[in-house]
Image (cartoon, rainbow, N blue to C red):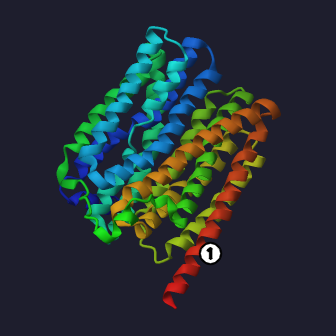
Amino acid sequence: MISTYRTLFSYKGTLSFTLAGMVARLPLPMMGIGIIMMISQLTGSYALAGTISASFVFTYAVLSPQISRLVDTYGQYRILPLFSLISVTGIGGMLLATWLQWHISLLFIFAALIGFMPCISAMIRARWTAIYKEDNRLQTAYSLESVFDEVTFILGPPISVTLSVAFFPQAGLLISAFFLIIGVLLLVLQRETEPAITPILSELTSYKTQSVIRFSLVKILTVIMIFMGVIVGTIDIFSVAFADAQNIPAGASLVLSAYAIGSCFAGLFFGTLKLSTPLHRLLCLGGIATFLTILPLVFVGSIYSLSFVVLISGIFFAPMIIVTMSLIEKNVPENQLTEGMTWLLAGLNVGTAIGATLTGQLVDYSGVQSGVWIAIGASALVMLIAFLGFQRINHKSHKNYA
């Protein structure tokens, strides 16, 4: 397995942009929880903290595909610093607003500005694609990126929480700004591995001006990612509530670690496989596996059984991300690849926010165990939409063959 991944870094500059990408993508998982920790400590209101954080998440989800579309047109070097600066300006404004006790309404404005942050994960995947397009190492690269995404979401929130508690409420958000500035600067200075801007032929100009979200496949995959995100958000909240109900608050970290570990190892293993199975069939099988492995949440009765269930369900999370990204790479025009990948990642983030919100409400009003039905419902929809996607792609393939 190690040798498989070592070959990825035989190309000059790959290790450098990977490390820069790790630094630059850390702020995303740090900012949401950083806003919640800061506002809740300063105001005592979790509802206000959650609403302001959601403003950031949804702004990011809406704008990040548009920013990536500009990147596809003008390049990472020109676009990333501009929008990163807007995001950092939003962070600076929010820090000032909380220190100087400005009106609460300004916090929503600054949260929206923070949401101008580019989707760094898509930028790194685009670099891998430019290097290994039509090479079987591209699946390995996508697998590695899925694992790195998991790692940042494991490390980012604890770093932000620890800084906010140990030093001052704004510390987590402040450090995330430094990570964003340093990471983006290191990334854009690496021009050798930046994807080239594909020239647009004059007869295709009107085609290029439209977003890739118009493709039915991109819509299907984005919706799948939204419901995958709902599962993640549900597990996050349900784990905390379940651990509290069991009088083992620290047990939530065991559950979340199990989910992340299952996903990380599955992603690493999947990246070493040379599968001949068509991607649309893998998508369908992944949807079925997602539903079947989430369903046992109904029967969990302890932290240990919950950890085991999410460990198994996590095994199919990273491969689903890898398959959807591979489908984007195969079906989206090369000059719009970054935008296509960003739609999926944005959908995942929106789904996580929706899942956490719905589960929190359901747990508050109907009890802890009721929260699992959000994840089960979302997994059923993942299976259904993956099947519809399989049918559509399969039909299209036969039509083209005929």
Res. 167 in view: no
The residue under the point 48% across, 50% down is 345
Farthest-out residue, top: 100
Give the residue type at disc 1: Gln
The residue under the point 73% across, 44% down is 372
The picture places residue 311, in percent across and down from the top left corner, at: 59, 49
The picture places residue 373, in percent across and down from the top left corner, at: 75, 47
Residue matched to label 1: 391
Q: Quick one: label 1, few (<14), some, or many (20+) residues within 10 Å?
A: some
Choose between 110 and 395: the one closer to the eye.
110
Farthest-out residue, bottom: 402
The residue under the point 29% across, 32% down is 181
The picture places residue 18, in percent across and down from the top left corner, at: 29, 48
Res. 30 in view: yes
Farthest-out residue, right: 366
Q: In this view, does 368 lie to the left or right of 313?
A: right
What secondary structure is found at the residue carrying circle 1?
helix
The residue under the point 24% across, 57% down is 9
The picture places residue 41, in percent across and down from the top left corner, at: 55, 14
What number of labels is visible?
1
Choose between 308 and 143: the one closer to the eye.
143
Q: Is residue 288 above or below residue 338?
A: below
The quadrant in which residue 137 appears is bottom left
The quadrant in which residue 99 appears is top left
Q: Is residue 273 left or right of residue 6?
A: right
Q: Is residue 39 above or below residue 155?
A: above
Choose between 292 and 51: the one closer to the eye.
51
Choose between 234 and 110: the one closer to the eye.
110
Q: In this view, does 240 lie above or below 134?
A: above
